[in-house]
Image (spheres, grey):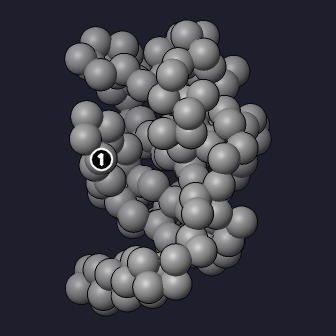
Amino acid sequence: MTDEITRKLCRYLRHRGHQFVIPNFYYGNWECDVFSMTMSNYTNEYEIKISKADFENDKYKSYRPYHGETQLKSVDTILGKRTSKMWYVFPMTLELDIPPYAGIIIYNRGQFKTIREAPFLHKRKVDMSNKLLYNIAVRCYDRFNSLR
């Protein structure tokens, strides 16, 4: 079910105008199920959960990027090394106690509904002023999506 939600979430975000949407995103110790960047150059992390155990297991990861209130004060967040917003995406039938620093998107029968907007953890934008790097990123993204 995670793969189905991931694919449909990527499509949903693209249709909502996000310029980059990348599933299974890894950067150093940090990973997220889906990473996106809006047209305003804000970044988003989406964690897809299909069970309460899946949600609870995140607390025991060696690198816990968004664990409790300390995330709001973490050095990575303050310096903008993490995403601007954090979201949890899960099926409508699942009841999870999502922390206040994260948004909630419910998945039901192929549709997504935002239940709670994610607050900004920081408002640093990605600097896309380097046109060469921007064009490389766009081509890599388009190529990646054409192969899927």
Between 28 and 11, the one nearer to me in the picture:
28
Picture layout, residue 115 above or below residue 142: above
Q: Would residue 123 be visible to someone looking at this image?
A: yes
Q: Residue at x 66, y 47 (%)?
A: 124
Residue 15 in picture, x, y percent from top left: 63, 77
Residue 143 in picture, x, y percent from top left: 30, 87
- Residue under label 1, please give it: 27
Q: Is residue 99 found left or right of 138 in the rendered image? A: right
Q: Is residue 17 found left or right of 9 in the rendered image? A: right
Residue 55 in picture, x, y percent from top left: 40, 24
Quadrant for the C terminus, please: bottom left
Secondary structure category for the residue under label 1: strand
Residue 26 in picture, x, y percent from top left: 28, 49
Q: Would residue 1 be visible to someone looking at this image?
A: no
Between 111 and 66, the one nearer to me in the picture:
66
Q: Residue at x 39, y 64 (%)?
A: 22
| Residue 6 occupies quadrant | bottom left
Q: Is residue 7 found left or right of 103 in the rendered image? A: left
| Residue 70 occupies quadrant | top right
Q: Residue at x 30, y 47 (%)?
A: 27
Picture layout, residue 40 above or below residue 73: below
Picture layout, residue 21 above or below residue 131: above
Q: Is residue 143 found left or right of 52 in the rendered image? A: left
Residue type (three-letter) at the residue carrying disc 1:
Tyr
